[in-house]
Amino acid sequence: SSPSPVLPANTSLYARQLLSNPPASHSAAIESAISKLQLLAHIEGGYFAETDRDALLVPNPFQHLPALANPTATDDSPTRHASTTIFYLLAPRSPVGYFHRNRGRTVHTLHRGRGVYVLLHMDRRDARTGKVPVETFVVGHDLDKGEKLQWIVEGGKFKASFLIPDSDSDTNTPATDTDVDGQPGSAAGLLISETVVPGFEYADHDFLTAETMRDALDPAQLHELKWLLKR
Ligand code: GUN
């Protein structure tokens, strides 16, 4: 028997449409958030700004680990900043945070919008299939629907995220309604804060590769999730 689909039904349609047919410009709301928060394009996809880097240095718990397979940088310093915090935004023009992992544990807090998170639990195997368990959940403000306002990603887990329509409660169809500024409900994007402990360094960061993804997942799940691989 093949494993059940991992993504909530049809939630990927909106982001995949945006990727294949990107809007020519940001909405006024997105433009304003990017400018007010001084956000820059992130290599993971989306936009970010580091808002805090604790001056306190702590022993680097990762110093003696083998280097990551494809680290964005190398660094085996004996210390790390105690924590860092960023704003992170997914917007229609950059609606996906592609699969990557950080060695540090990350606390996420939602400010605006709605999205889907996908976690690959690389430290576990399904007893029956031998494949890596996949976890998905919706982040949003509808607590009655089980959407999350806060979520934790333990260090070492691969993570991807994508934008879903915010004001349309029916995820089967992309939002067609408009909000106050005449933009679709997701026009303000998915805006969160992330705090990493110990603080973020590129040496502690890597992207999922096609090979690792192929080994980790069942073919049906691979087919469903491969669009979240950074190319
Ligand atoms: N610089 C580039 N990417 C990041 C990130 O994800 N977090 C922090 N704190 N700084 C970064």
Image: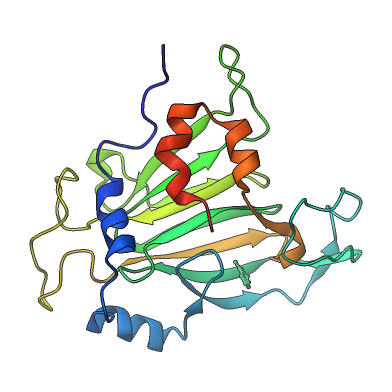
- Relative to 143, is 3 on the left or the right? right
Q: Is residue 172 above or below residue 178?
A: above
- Residue 84, image quadrant: bottom right
Which image quadrant shows ligand 1? bottom right
Depth check, front residue: 56 or 147: 147
Depth check, front residue: 34 or 192: 34
Q: Residue at x 23, y 40 (%)?
A: 144
Q: Position of residue 106 (x, y in %)?
A: 59, 54
Q: Position of residue 58 (x, y in %)?
A: 83, 64
Q: Residue at x 23, y 64 (%)?
A: 186
Q: Position of residue 215 (x, y in %)?
A: 63, 32
Q: Position of residue 139 (x, y in %)?
A: 36, 50
* Quadrant housing the C terminus: bottom right
- Relative to 90, is 114 on the left or the right? left
- Residue 206, image quadrant: bottom right
Depth check, front residue: 68 or 229: 229
* Quadrant housing the N terminus: top left
Q: Residue at x 36, y 37 (%)?
A: 7
Depth check, front residue: 64 or 45: 45
Q: Residue at x 68, y 32 (%)?
A: 123
- Residue 83, image quadrant: bottom right
